[in-house]
Structures are given as structure tokens and as C-alpha cells.
Amino acid sequence: ETGVTQTPRHLVMGMTNKKSLKCEQHLGHNAMYWYKQSAKKPLELMFVYNFKEQTENNSVPSRFSPECPNSSHLFLHLHTLQPEDSALYLCASSQGAWGARTEAFFGQGTRLTVV
Amino acid sequence: DQQVKQNSPSLSVQEGRISILNCDYTNSMFDYFLWYKKYPAEGPTFLISISSIKDKNEDGRFTVFLNKSAKHLSLHIVPSQPGDSAVYFCAASGDDKIIFGKGTRLHILP
């Protein structure tokens, strides 16, 4: 139990569907992140939220829409995805500002398949 | 352009021997380095870190070495155990960034 929980663990969706990924952290952290892990690629940072404010959007297509209603919850809303968006989506949280000397704690990830 | 490189996609080591995982970086602004371990179907878990003011940090069987002039760090695991079989990610932070390498898959052979 890492304290960062992601649901669902697996998701299969059609290209015209709308779905959401959820992340919840119980560590009292103030920064939360979405990462994408594709096969044979480094972890790619997608979004950063610090104290509920989005501080970074790493050139992510608009079909991915993040939402951070409070410091403990982070959502990734998905709309009209492409097959190449199939990947493992990881949520992470940390105590301290982005780039500070701090470790991030990761959730177990959501394995997304777009058909 | 990859700023953090793990050039070995996989590594096999006999149980009980030393495992050495390598990582190179290009950005001189990085000043804090981390290693994460990832099992299948799980998120990465933090393993060990090192600040740029140090050249070595040890935690039990895990030691990280940093060579700033060569922009190189390595993770040593000794003795290697079956439970160490996983993917290991190197990460570098600084300049308001945290960048991960592609990972190295470590197989511990019985």
C-alpha cells in the first residue's frame, strides 16, 4: 500500500467514448502528477498540480483533460482517444514543490487500451 | 533528446552476486538523483537517492554512486536476491524538472 490509489486498474475504451481515471492520495502531499508510460519509452510527465493549481502541462493533447478538485484527488478525463494513447497511466504525489529534492510516490497505474 | 539515459535495457545477474545498473545524464542543472524500482502491474517505488553534493549513498544492500564529472551514476545491489528482479528507473531532478530514464530490466538468476 503506497498511499496513492488509482482506479480503475484496467480500462478498455472505444475511440468515441468518454471515461475518467481517478487518483487519490492519503499522504497529505500537496503536489500530484499524471505520467504516461508507453512501451520502450521513458516515463512521460503529462500534468503537474501544486496546491490544486495546474503548474505544468507538458504539451499534452486536449483529448486529455485533468481535474484536481482538492489536494487529495486528481482526475484525468479522456475523450476521443486514439489507439496510440494506449499505455499505462501513473499518478504520483509528493510533498513539496515540483523539482524540489523530494521523492514521489506512485500509484499502481491504470492500464488503458483504446480500441 | 534524452537527458537521462539507461543504455542497458536488460541485465541478468546470478543470485548472490553484485548487480550494477548504470545511468547517464546530460543536463548539468540536475542536482538530485533517484532510483525507482518497478514490479509488473505496480507503480514505481522509491528506492534510494543521492544529492549532487555527495558521491555515494548507501542503504542496506543498495548503494548509489555519483560521478559528476562524467555525469554518470550507478546503483549497486549486493548481494542480489530473487526479489530484486524488476525494472529499475533512474531519475534526475533540478532546473524545475524531474526526468526519468527508460529503465533497465534486472533478472536475478537462481
Image: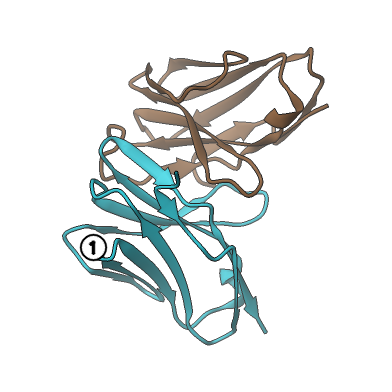
Chain colours: A brown, B cyan
Give the image location of residue B36, x and y in percent.
46, 55
- Name the residue nearer the viewer: B85 or B26: B26
Classify 10 Å Cα crowding around label 1: few (below 14), some (14-19), many (20 and above).
some
x%, y% of residue A71?
A: 40, 22
Seen as rendered, the residue at the extreme left is B53
Quadrant (top left/top right/bottom left/bottom right) for the N terminus of chain B: top left
In the rendered image of this protein, does residue A97 appear above or below residue A75? Answer: below
Residue at image coords 57%, 46%: B43
The location of residue B67, given as percent across then percent down, is 26, 67
Residue sticking out furthest to the front: B1
Q: Which residue, given by chain and number where applicable, does mark 1 sit on?
A: B68
Q: Dot 1: what SS?
A: loop
Q: In the rendered image, which quarter contains the C terminus of chain B?
A: bottom right
The image quadrant of residue A93 is top left
Vertical side of A2 occupied by A4: above or below: above
Is residue B30 shown above or below A73? below
The residue closer to the viewer here, B36 or A44, is A44
Seen at 53% across and 46% down, the residue is A42
Residue type at mark 1?
A: Lys
Q: Quadrant of residue A80?
A: top right
Residue at the image point whose x is 47% and y is 52% from the top: B101
Judge from the rendering whether residue A99 lies leftward or rightward of residue A82; answer left or right.
left
Q: Chain of mark 1?
A: B
**Where is residue B27 drawn, in percent x and y?**
29, 48
